[in-house]
Image (cartoon, helix red, strand yellow):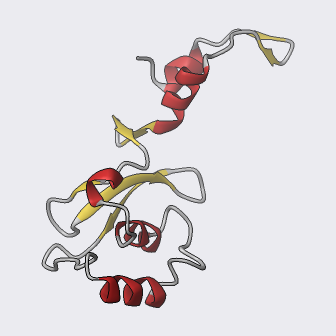
Amino acid sequence: MKTLKEHLDSLYWDEGTVVQEWTEQEFVNMLLEAEYQGREVKLDKPFSGDSKHKRYVYVKNEKGNIIKLGFGDPNMEIKRDNPERRKSFRARHQCDSNPGPKWKARYWSCRFWSSTPVNKLD
């Protein structure tokens, strides 16, 4: 599969308009893949951490740069299956009213504290 850069390099330009068209699936794949420190990564796909944080996710920040965002304490277990704890966490972090932008840890923590099973979030 071509990277976004390879697709952009292969375009043909004719008086300022793009001649080559992409299929919808190719376009979606390009939006979900990005390059971080010279390697291809998938955007918005959380994965388990190995050091400072419990989970990581690659996202585009407000400037359009790809960043590796860490969230969650690796030494703590989240008890999201307890409805009282889930309600308290979501209220404390304003998950329902304002979860924040995708490039902030609060957004991803709120997603993991939702009622959706964790294996569906990864």
**Where is residue 121 drawn, in percent x and y?**
35, 54
Does residue 24 appear to the left or right of 15 in the view shown? left
**Callout count:** 0
Q: Residue at x 46, y 24 (%)?
A: 3
Where does residue 114 sit, x and y in percent of width and height? 40, 70
Give the farthest residue toward the front: 83
Name, please, the residue furthest toward the right. Answer: 15
Q: Residue at x 68, y 13 (%)?
A: 21
Could you say which quadrant of the image residue 105 lies in?
A: bottom left
- On screen, residue 45 versus residue 98, left or right, reads left
Which quarter of the image is occupied by the N terminus?
top left
Observer-nearest of 105 and 68? 105
Query: Image height check: is 98 above or below 19?
Result: below
Above-or-below relation of 114 to 84: above
The image quarter in which residue 72 lies: bottom left
Q: In the picture shown, does residue 51 fall above or below 44? A: below
Q: In the rendered view, does 69 fall on the left or right side of 65?
A: left
Q: Quadrant of residue 101?
A: bottom right
Please tell me which residue is depicted at 28% across the width and 76% down the height of the picture: 80
Whole-percent x, y for residue 90 in the image = 44, 82
Pinpoint residue 71: horizontal percent, then vertical percent: 32, 69
